[in-house]
Image: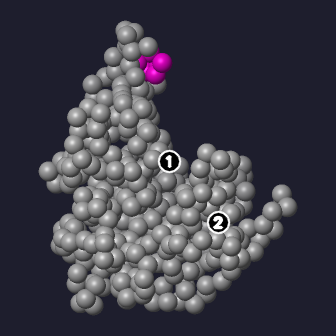
Amino acid sequence: MFDRVYEPIPTILADLEPGPELGGILACIDVTEVSPHDRITVLQAHHRQRSYYDAQVYRDMAAVVDVMEDGDPQWAAESAAAEIRVALRLTRRATDTELSFALELRQRLPRVWDALVAGNIDIRRAKTFSYATTHLSDATTRRVVDRVIDVAGQLTTGELKARLDRVAMEADPDGAQERYEDAVKDRRLVVERTTSGTANLMGLELPPHRVSAVSRRINHLARSLNTRDDPRSMDQLRADVYLDLLTGNADSSAGGVHIQTDLDTLAGLATHPGELAGYGPVIADIARQVAAEQDGAQWRWTITDPATGQALYNGTTRRRPTVSQRRTVLAHNQTCIFPGCRMPAIDCDLDHRTRWVDGGETTIDNLAPLCRHDHRIRHQAGWTHQPLPNGDHQWITKLGHTYTTSGRPP
């Protein structure tokens, strides 16, 4: 396949901003006739162009409201929604949701709309901004957006949500603490019947550090049961362990908690958010609670410089910690280093950048955490990675595209 003679694509395609010119060029490209490497470039160009068109759709929705003005903004929006609903064959609920988002982009999130027009973000990321800032004042929202919008296109929606949550906590720490306290008062257990005859059991509005500890314990026990003789999938094992724990039938071993915070916050001198592995940003009070509530269980900790976010020191609560090399690698890479993956590093394999069978040594510089899935991708699909001086990692894909990723919190 790779030995074929392929049609070249315009050299400007990778950097051309979306709009009529890009749309015209893309209309003339048959993706089946271009090289494997260039197919990714064409895909990215179409993705930017789609974002551009999505922005125009939301602009047009908001513009319908403008011509309905009669002194009552609420009635103008309802009247416009009726026009849009019939024209686009949408349900009433879907129309209300989409029109509200269109007006929000214009009034509360103008920089997000600009980024969408420019193809720097897509509609999923635009909506992530909306969801993550809905509880903030307009002034705080603008500050949060200004700090994140320029890097939003480089993050997955999960990474973007975590980044926005962290920045929002930093921008309004008192409000974040108040929202947490109000929400946790509403913690509850919900049981739902399903149409298939099964049931769902959910705990809502729970303290995140306790949820993280429970999740790690379940994962720890499920992995210990994952043998060739057991036909259950990991999802089935986790579900069964969950029920066994609640009925008192499971082993009592625990998986531990991993919290990352800066020294000022740990000492009570600042209110910077912490980072709970497998969950994301948590308010400063939760970070301090995790440190204070450990009683016999193992937990790994990393103290970071509040100015740079770089790891300064790390360790475990046990007398005999894990191997020094593993501790150091995990201190500098909190998650799987594969682009976009947020699997906690403590649940990952330690990958030899230069394989052991090829003479690679087991040294800190040659080790990095990769989740089991991405570990297989790296070796079986032919991806390569190497560390950069600033602690990031540069990846080269099978098709020759280069990406840079970091194991630090997004």
Q: Could you tell me residue 374's position as x and y percent? A: 42, 44
Q: Could you tell me residue 185's position as x and y percent? A: 57, 90
Residue of label 1: 54
User: What segment is highlighted magenta in the picture?
Assistant: 28-34
Q: Could you tell me residue 385's position as x and y percent? A: 27, 40
Quadrant in the picture for the N terminus: top left
In this rendered view, identify the residue nearer to me: 94 or 129: 129
- Identify residue type, mark 2: Val
Identify the residue at image location x=44%, y=72%: 256
Identify the residue at image location x=75%, y=74%: 191
Q: Name the element at disc 2.
A: helix
Which class describes the residues within 10 Å of circle 1: few (<14), some (14-19), or many (20+)?
A: some
Give the label, 1 or 2, closer to the camera. 2
Q: Is residue 249 left or right of residue 145?
A: right
Which class describes the residues within 10 Å of circle 2: few (<14), some (14-19), or many (20+)?
A: many
- Identify residue type, mark 1: Asp
Q: Could you tell me residue 110's position as x and y percent? A: 39, 62
Q: Is residue 406 visible?
A: yes
Residue of label 2: 241
Q: Name the element at disc 1.
A: helix
Give the answer, above or below, for where 260 lies relative to 121: below
Give the answer, above or below, for where 315 lies relative to 56: below
Who comes first in sequence, dot 1 or dot 2? Answer: 1
Quadrant in the picture for the C terminus: bottom left
